Image (cartoon, rainbow, N blue to C red):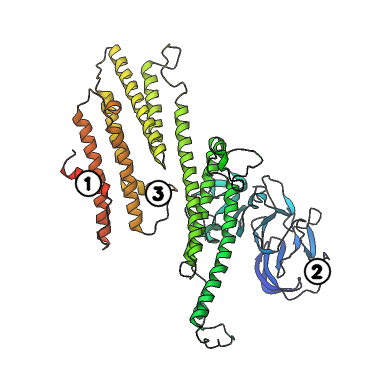
Amino acid sequence: MVNDDNVSNPSNNFWLWGTWGKRVIKAPFLTQKVPGRIRDVIIGHNFIIALREDGHLVSWGEDKVGCLGLGAEQTNVQEPKKISFPDNFKGKVVDIQYGKHHVLALTSLGKVYAWGDNGSGQLGLNDHQNRYEPVAVEELKPYTVTQILAVDGMSYALTNHGVVYAWGDNKDGCLALEHDKAMVEKPEPMMRMKETQVKKLVVKDCGGLSGRGKTVIAFVELAEPLADKDQIGGFEKPLGGTETAPEKAALSEDAEKDNDIFEGVDLMRRVMDNTQEWWEHILKVRHGSPYNDNPTQVDDLADKKEEDNCTAMQLDSYVGLDTLEKASYELDMLIQSAKDQLTEIRMKKGTKNVKFMLSLFMDDCKLRREKIRRTVAARQLMDYKQSMGHKDGPDILGQGGGTAEAQLNRLTEQLSEKLRKVRNLRTYDLFTRVLQDSLGEVLECRLHAVSLQHELVKAKGGHRADAVLPGIKIIKERWLTLKKFSIYNLYQECTLRGQGLNFGSDDEMLSNLTSKSDAQIDQIIQIHRNDLISRDVLIPPLCYELLTENAELRKMCNTYQLKVLLMKDGKEKPVIPAAQQRASGRAAIGYE
């Protein structure tokens, strides 16, 4: 760092013209303020911040909210002064961004600093106090940030795992987070993009209603930089560059083998370093780790307890579901990073051990992610079950709550809503699926009992009652549920409700949707076939058989819809799983 606050011996820095605040500069004006070469500048309303080649920042001009970064006492300086960072600052500044009245700086070590106006929490410091000097954004310290972006009163950060964090002004939900809180005081991950790895952020002026609209774009697939021959002019080498020397003679066969070995060893070292960094991040995430039910098999390295001294079981039982979802998202990003590295080295020689290690790491991440998802599904089902213990039945003592018929109608609506939520819950393993089925059967039986009570109330009032009607209502409910499991409806859920998944092709997506629809139909049929619990003896068996036949036909339609869509595009006949073929056969010849 330069010791003197004032900078001397200025160079020719940059020309500027156009509208600047309330001024209009009609002729290019040469700025000569900062010594040495400049990497970037921020043009504020009445001030300028310059990023020098050595990574230091200097500022000059006037700003009342702290954007100069020189302290609360210096809000108007005529000559450039160096911006001081905290004592524990490491690396150098490589990028600066300016919003409406706040500044973000990114260091070479991937850390973010902020200062200026904080009225909407855009500094990410968990408060609304302005800062007149750079302050580290603590929430992002555990991550390596590769890009920052400031847009009006909003701030964004992109990590090396492709995760985008957003904070600041969230009026009208413009931060695109999962909630509509007006101001977000600290960085939050954008969970709607969790299925993809973002490579780059840009902001584009799009006009908008006021003529000053801005749109943020997150690139997922980004093209490689243009080669020299594809640059303007199409030269095979940079203009003014020297001709490349002729290729040397090929190495001997033994020398090539030695070279492959050395390259493999070096690649192994670099991948080991990356994997070690990812593994340390997994340990910080904590969620998804195995339960240590055998004290003789405890791994002191992998099972270090934090200050809260919580076990993995306690974390799964009591931590918030949003925290578990965030942990699952971070594991998704680690899996994607490992996949990218596998893709990068797939054509290189001597990478057998490297590929094996990366595959082991990915399997560990997938197992942890599956465990988290199972935990989330089980916790949600448990919550639904516990909520049923609340008093929501009819008031048998007649102490209020309306007539018996009104109370029964209200209870029917509550039970139907709970049944819908239970059936729509996504499960990930056999245990949670069985729990889901059992809970659904309990709710159906309860609905059936309430319907019978409703018929009894009608009979008591002198109206005609029908003991068969409750069973018919259950069949109708199952039929309406089956109608929702079409490929089109599932596609709408995946694309329009923020549940998008990454597929290698349209064929893969259609096949996945078909399997998902068939699995959900099978789940309803399985409950439907339980004669002892799920069937009413007053209902003719033919009604249940017709519903089963309808379900099998729907599965057959899914299979052939997939075939038609693939053959329409000229694809070969797809391989249909044996289970689907059997289901289609039964539907075609009549249910057994």
Residue that lies at the very extreme toward the front in this rendered image = 296
Eyeballing the image, is 9 above or below 72? Answer: below
User: What residue sits right under mark 1 in the picture?
Assistant: 584
Determine crowd level at label 1: few under 14, some 14-19, many 20+ residues with C-alpha closer than 10 A.
Answer: many
Q: Amino acid at mark 2?
A: Val
Residue 529 point in image, percent of width and height = 27, 33
Q: Amino acid at mark 3?
A: Cys
Determine crowd level at label 2: few under 14, some 14-19, many 20+ residues with C-alpha closer than 10 A.
Answer: some
Q: CA distance from mark 3 to mark 2?
A: 57 Å
- Give whichever of discs 3 and 2 has the lower sequence position: 2
* SS label for mark 1: helix
- Give whichever of discs 2 and 1 has the lower sequence position: 2
* Rendered residue at 56%/88% (across/down): 243
* SS label for mark 2: loop
Q: Amino acid at mark 1?
A: Ser
Residue that lies at the very extreme toward the left in this rendered image = 589
Instruction: Tell me the mark number nearer the camera, choosing from 3 and 1.
Output: 1
Q: Is residue 296 left or right of residue 478?
A: right
Instruction: Tell me the mark number nearer the camera, choosing from 2 and 1.
Output: 1
Residue 113 point in image, percent of width and height = 69, 56
Counting labels gives 3
Q: CA distance from mark 3 to mark 1?
A: 25 Å
Q: Is residue 87 left or right of residue 137?
A: right
Q: Is residue 278 left or right of residue 371?
A: right
* The N terminus - image quarter: bottom right
Eyeballing the image, is 530 above or below 568? Answer: above
Q: 258 and 4: which one is in front?
A: 258
User: What residue sits right under mark 3 in the picture?
Assistant: 494
* Rendered residue at 48%/68% (across/down): 223
User: What residue sits right under mark 2 in the picture?
Assistant: 7
